[in-house]
Amino acid sequence: MKEIQAFAKQYQQEMGWNINADNYEKSRASLLNNYMLLTTEVAEVAEELRKAFNKTNECIRNGIDEETSFRLAKESIKEDLGKEFADCLAYIVKISNFFEIDLDKSFYSKMEEVKNRKNKDISVKTNK
């Protein structure tokens, strides 16, 4: 993740896409704009999932079994879904870099916190 953060920082500078740090009001406006763009990209992830579900249902209606239908649908959105995840990651990294957050450290720390939660989701199925 450190490499991605360093790449993104340089890339955003080259493209002139840095979050404005001139003063509070400009930073606030720039952060809100980037947050809005991030949420737009998250919605585009949802749209790709919707496409996969619709494609699965269409295939099932055409007589293809459910597992094959879903596999075909996943393949049909894989490339575009990857692009949408990349867009989301770019905005997350951009905002993280602005706040000088080490995403590696934050990610692993959060996963450890989740693992040790008392009130975590459980599944009826067990993985053996």
Image: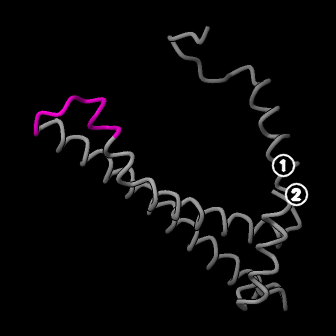
Q: Which amino acid type corresponds to the residue marked 1 in the rendered image?
A: Ser
Where residue 22 appears, x then y in whole percent? 84, 91
Which residue is under mark 2? 102
Query: Mark 2: few, some, or many residues within 10 Å (few <14, many ≥20)?
Result: some
Query: For residue 37, which numbered disc appears in the image?
Result: none
Judge whether residue 27 is colored magenta: no
Magenta segment, principal secondary structure? Answer: helix
Part of the protein shown in magenta: 62-71
Task: Give the image quarter of residue 94.
Answer: bottom right
Judge whether residue 67 is colored magenta: yes
Q: Is residue 81 above or below residue 95?
A: above
Q: On the rendered structure, is 120 left or right of 111?
A: left
Asked if the residue at tag 1 contacts the one at tag 2, i.e. Cβ–Cβ closer than 8 Å, the answer is: yes
- Residue at the image position 81 percent from the left and 76 percent from the top: 9
Q: Is residue 19 above or below residue 47?
A: below
- Residue at the image position 39 percent from the left and 56 percent from the top: 48
Q: Which amino acid type corresponds to the residue marked 2 in the rendered image?
A: Asp
Q: On the rendered structure, is 123 left or right of 77?
A: right
Where residue 91 appears, x then y in whole percent? 66, 69
Q: On the rendered structure, is 34 left or right of 102?
A: left
Between residue 113 and residue 79, name the one nearer to us: 79
Where residue 44 appears, x then y in whole percent? 44, 63
Q: Quadrant of the C terminus?
A: top right
Which residue is under mark 1? 106
Between residue 55 and residue 71, name the one nearer to us: 71
- Residue at the image position 52 percent from the left and 64 percent from the top: 83
Q: On the rendered structure, is 64 left or right of 68?
A: left
The residue sitting at the left extreme is 62
- Disc 2 to disc 1, how far (Cα)? 6 Å
